[in-house]
Image (tube, grey):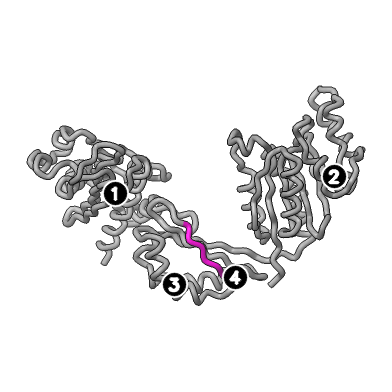
Amino acid sequence: MHKPVTAEIISIGDELLYGQILDTNSKWLSEEMDKIGVRVIRKTTIGDDPEAMIQAFKLASKKADIILMTGGLGPTKDDLTKNVLAEFFNSSMKLFPDALEDVRHFFESRGRELSPTNRSQAYLPSNCTYIQNAVGTAPGMWFEEYKSVWMSMPGVPHEMKYLMENAVIPKIKEKYKLPVIYHKVIKTIGIGESWLSDIISEWEDQLPSHIRLAYLPSLGEVKLRLTGFGNSFDLIVKEVDEEIDKLEPLISKYIYGFNTDTIASVIGQTLIQNNENIAIAESCTGGYLSHVVTSIPGASNYYNGGIIPYHNAFKENLLDVDPVTLSTKGAVSEDTVIEMSKQVRLKFKSTYGLATSGVAGPGGGSKEKPVGLVWIACHDGEKCLTRKLQLTKDRLINIQLTSTASLNLLRETILQNRK
């Protein structure tokens, strides 16, 4: 396999540290480097501080083959990147005629004169290769110093992307023999990260050295990302798929999809394939579960409708939940969600009825029914699966976790009906 090629991304600007601007550049750069087989090993964010910039450059020069820098290239006095780079490389500043002509043309084409401040943008470190920025005035600068490639680009996203796509990526491909990096993500639900790790630990230990596993937990789910490194794309895809074939029997009941699949999209596809549909009765989720379901294009093919009987009176009046159940068991109970799921299914003439009821928080809990206690149910007309959840004290997290768990309960119901 070709020697790994590594990169560091350095984002420059006080506005990034103040939180005034979201750094979307480094995310995009990481994705683009991954596509061509370059491993990003570190991301650094620094302010408009020459000392901090020099320190970051020194660290990067010891670690990475490629250093991608964004920001600090404007015409104003707070834009320091060019001068600091010249100092770091022991270089002088000089006027680049091509850069001056490009800046002049940029302004003249827009009916504006070139100001002295903008003219200064054509002064660059003498050891750089000037990279034309056809969509802005800030220049791109390519350096080959300290056994590394350095690329300085404007922080404006569309300008940075133009330089990367039209100059930087082609030059990187030309300079380096790049390995193949391939990712495949296995989506799991209904099991925590540590339990999942225990089940697959032996399989994980036997992975070949050029295939790595990462655990990526999120609300109610755990993604397993397999990353393969090699010289042949077809071969590494084959090897990763072979490892997944070994993994699937161990955790098949928790796997719902791969890569860009979501639990909502997979369930939607399954319902369409089976010519089935759902209706939803939501109390504690307040419509969020229906929002998740209907966020998938084509949801009208399987989502019949929903009711949000937040107040107990409407559980009784709209859903025909037995008032005795509500008075003796309470709204947050297994009995209540069973009736809710049964009735919403009947009212909307659906294959499945889903129901949620709980104490979302942060108030409203009791010793018997603390904040985070939730009951969910899925009724298929013959049987009803239920689940008791004990979640967090955070209201929004509880709503999201309940919705994810409800969709998983629907998935389990569908799987049981297939047996």
Which element carries disc 1, helix, strand or loop?
loop
Of the two numbered discs 2 and 3 in the rendering, the one whose residue sits closer to the viewer: 2
What's the mark number on residue 86? Answer: 2
Q: Which residues are magenta?
A: 210-216
Which element carries disc 3, helix, strand or loop?
helix
Residue 189 in picture, x, y percent from top left: 37, 58
373 in the magenta segment = no
The Cα–Cα distance between marks 4 and 1, rounded to whole angstroms, is: 39 Å
Few, some or many residues within 10 Å of mark 1 (<14, 14–19, 20+): many
Q: Which residue is mark 3?
A: 201
Specify the quadrant that holds the C terminus.
bottom left
Q: Earlier in the sequence, mark 2 or mark 3?
A: 2
**Does 217 sit above or below residue 284?**
below
Q: Earlier in the sequence, mark 4 or mark 3?
A: 3
Few, some or many residues within 10 Å of mark 4 (<14, 14–19, 20+): many
The Cα–Cα distance between marks 2 and 3, rounded to whole angstroms, is: 50 Å
Q: Quadrant of residue 237?
A: bottom right
Q: Which residue is mark 1?
A: 277
Specify the quadrant that holds the N terminus.
bottom right
